[in-house]
């Protein structure tokens, strides 16, 4: 069968199965590419070799880093270090709060929380603290979700984040290289975040007539902002400065000395667990290690997809599906727009991902790279813009489980109503970020 036809069939089947939502995503990514490989005429041995090669490449470039990175940051979250930082921010502001400060703090806490590289964890850090303040100021709680997610998106360049690792896998490049290329995109979010603060402040003032506390409300104190959460038995507040020092050393080792990331994370995890939990060392490792199981299955499933999508014999006797599809797209897509295909999809990412799972959108990366290569564009230059900007889209779609987590914590009853409202905000936020990137030279052709 023609590689082009098979590529289209594979994409259609994968999208249809995901939209049907009756079959686990990982199962789809395991089975469909494998069957397509056999239909293309590859033997079981050839198919297996394609997959094993892809898995080895991914685990070497990013998998081990992600494994130990997740273990370390799960431990760090358990120690309560991030809770202590957030508590200090609240005490610093004290009773000087107004609507603008509440929104700024939501952004800061969202950014700090995403150092864990986990969206759901960030929501759990940010929303229980900030939502009571949003209620006190009668501030629309949808703003909290939007502001937090925009801050998360700006921080998506973290090399230990699963989103960046997925993008690096699709681009076939090293995660740390892609992270370095994505940092300027994260900085391009700053004007967009400020514009969100301004816009939401104007909207709130029109509704309430003030940016301060509504008339008759009690003064905000640090006590009134404390959340009523059960005490974390694994919290080690007395070891805060030690844990913070280890964390700083991790960042310096990665960013300055370029020490291999998996070595840095495994060393940090060992030190953190040994000092914080000397009596239940094994227990905390077991708890932290469980966070990687689902991620590992997902990584292997994506490897199946990538391996078959890019599969081609070394002798050049057959063309890969991605190259065949790129050639076909070249004939269909207007020639003057081919060079800008990735940019068009970037600009439309928010509305597309509202209806199509982001995993399917990620699956288009090899196509963008193949088309861009015909114009002399490197894979990192094409994929780096998506690393941060895609985060704006993944929180405003009812097809992402994290959206339901965020809406629940923000006490938003109707997910679809939230997604429709926030989708418009995030669409324009995405446009602003791209415009800033163009004006500053971060995005160039």
Image (cartoon, rainbow, N blue to C red):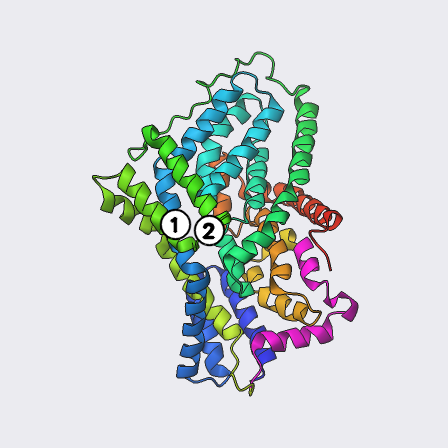
**Marks 2 and 1: CB-CB under 8 Å?**
yes
Distance from disc 2 to disc 1, alpha carbons, whole Å, reads: 10 Å
Magenta stretch secondary structure, dominant: helix
Residue located 66% across and 41% down the image:
425
Q: How far across and down, in percent of the image, does residue 270 sit?
A: 31, 46
Residue 96, label in figure? none
Label 2 vs 1, first from the N-terminus: 2
How many numbered badges does the structure rendering display? 2
Q: How far across and down, in percent of the image, does residue 354 sit?
A: 60, 52
Quarter location, residue 240: top left
Residue 364 in view: no
Q: Is residue 124 left or right of residue 377?
A: left
Which segment is the magenta one? Answer: 318-347
Q: How far across and down, in percent of the image, does residue 69 sit?
A: 40, 50
Compared with 148, 439 (above or below) is below
Which quadrant would the N terminus be assigned to in this image? Answer: bottom right
Which residue was labeled with disc 1? 265
Looking at the image, the residue that sits furthest to the front is 257
The stretch drawn in magenta includes residue 340: yes
Q: Is residue 236 left or right of residue 436?
A: left
Residue located 73% across and 66% down the image:
339
Which residue was labeled with disc 2? 160
The stretch drawn in magenta includes residue 368: no
- In front of the other: 410 or 247: 247
Residue 304 in view: yes
- In front of the other: 367 or 23: 367
Residue located 57% across and 52% down the image:
180
Circle 2 packing at 10 Å, graded few (<14), some (14-19), many (20+), is many
Q: How far across and down, in percent of the image, does residue 28 sit?
A: 45, 66
């Amino acid at each position: 069968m023609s590689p082009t036809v098979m590529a289209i069939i594979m994409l259609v089947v994968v999208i249809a199965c995901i939209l049907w939502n009756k079959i686990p995503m990982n199962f789809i990514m395991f089975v469909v590419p494998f069957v397509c490989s056999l239909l293309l005429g590859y033997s079981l041995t050839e198919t297996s070799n394609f997959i094993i090669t892809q898995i080895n490449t991914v685990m070497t470039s990013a998998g081990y880093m992600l494994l130990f990175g997740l273990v370390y940051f799960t431990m760090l979250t358990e120690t309560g270090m991030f809770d202590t930082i957030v508590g200090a921010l609240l005490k610093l502001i004290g009773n000087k709060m107004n609507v603008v400060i509440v929104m700024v703090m939501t952004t800061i806490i969202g950014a700090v929380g995403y150092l864990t590289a986990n969206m759901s964890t960030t929501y759990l850090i940010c929303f229980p603290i900030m939502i009571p303040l949003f209620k006190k100021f009668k501030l629309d709680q949808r703003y909290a979700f939007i502001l937090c997610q925009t801050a998360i998106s700006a921080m998506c360049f973290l090399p230990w984040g699963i989103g960046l690792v997925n993008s690096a896998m699709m681009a076939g490049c090293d995660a740390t290289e892609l992270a370095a290329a994505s940092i300027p995109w994260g900085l391009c979010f700053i004007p967009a975040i400020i514009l969100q603060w301004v816009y939401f402040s104007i909207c709130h003032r029109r509704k309430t007539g003030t940016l301060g506390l509504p008339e008759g409300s009690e003064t905000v104190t640090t006590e009134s902002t404390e959340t009523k959460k059960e005490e974390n038995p694994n919290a080690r507040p007395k070891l805060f400065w030690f844990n913070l020092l280890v964390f700083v050393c991790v960042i310096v080792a990665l960013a300055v000395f370029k020490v291999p990331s998996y070595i840095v994370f495994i060393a940090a995890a060992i030190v953190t667990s040994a000092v914080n939990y000397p009596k239940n060392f094994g227990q905390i490792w077991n708890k932290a290690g469980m966070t990687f199981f689902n991620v590992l299955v997902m990584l292997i499933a994506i490897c199946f997809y990538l391996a078959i999508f890019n599969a081609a014999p070394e002798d050049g006797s057959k063309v890969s599906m991605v190259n065949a599809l790129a050639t076909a797209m070249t004939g269909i897509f207007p020639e003057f727009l081919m060079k800008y295909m990735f940019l068009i999809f970037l600009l439309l990412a928010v509305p597309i991902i509202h209806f199509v799972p982001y995993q399917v959108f990620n699956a288009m990366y090899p196509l963008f790279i193949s088309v861009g290569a015909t114009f002399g564009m490197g894979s990192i230059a094409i994929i780096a813009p998506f690393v941060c900007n895609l985060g704006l889209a993944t929180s405003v779609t009812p097809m992402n489980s994290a959206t339901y987590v965020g809406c629940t914590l923000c006490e938003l009853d109707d997910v679809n109503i939230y997604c429709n409202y926030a989708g418009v905000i995030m669409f324009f936020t995405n446009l602003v970020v791209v415009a800033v990137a163009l004006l500053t030279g971060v995005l160039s052709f």
